Amino acid sequence: LSVKSRYARALADLRLPCAAVGLNPMYGPGLSPARPRGLAVQLRSAGRSSQFLADLERAGISLLRLATAEDHDRMCAQWQALPHAAVISFGAALNALQADATAVARDFAPPPFQALCALLGRMLAMSPQTYAEVQGSNQFAAQARAGLAQALQALGNGGTKEWAAVWQQAGQALSPVD
């Protein structure tokens, strides 16, 4: 569902003279965002695929059009696989620490804890298979999780210098890319 590269390869192997579009709504099944949005990639641009995407946009769906299926999958690793892994890992760590994450604790905890608990609760209300598919089928997901593990390891090495380096890297992630 969240991976388009394998479908693009299968279509290329079939050599059918037809249009094909990959769409990813970027929100879970059963959720209705206030502003429908998603990612779109033309897997095969023959036929009316451009018109189809334009029709969706005219209907009020915001689309981020990506050049290739690989671009789509790389972005989904960053936007889905990485945050999902971080939030689920947070929940697993809370459990391992036997932490108090009750509603009372969440009311008094600082905002980052509250935000992560809210994200964790939202994710746990969904099907674990959806998240497993995002993690398991995307060829770039392992790289995203490795980046998360590397950053956590760097923080765990201790001192102010390590924290400052990871802090700077985190800030650079929010800077515009040239």
Image: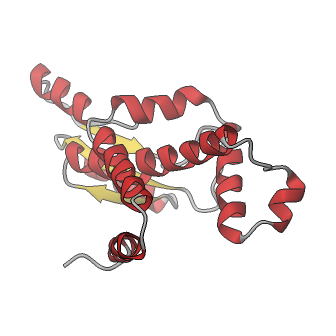
Quadrant of res 14 = top left
Q: Which is more toward the observer, 88 or 175?
A: 88
Q: Is residue 160 left or right of 60 when viewed as pictured? A: left
Residue occupying the far right of the picture: 104
54 over 163 or under it: above or below? above
Q: Position of residue 38 (x, y in %)?
A: 44, 53
Report the quarter where the N terminus lies: top left
Residue 27 in the image: state x and y as whole percent.
Answer: 55, 48
Closer to the camera, 28 or 146? 146
Give the residue furthest to the top: 14
Residue 1 shows up from this direction: no
Residue at 87% x, 54% y is 103
**Drawn side of residue 87 relative to residue 167, left or right:** right
**Relative to 131, residue 177 above or below:** below
Residue at 24% over, 75% down: 177
Where residue 65 sits, quadrant-wise, is: bottom left
- Measuring 50% from the left and 49% from the top, which residue is drawn there? 86
Where residue 116 appears, as percent x and y from the top left, is 64, 57
**Quadrant, the C terminus:** bottom left
Q: Residue at x 77, y 66 (%)?
A: 109
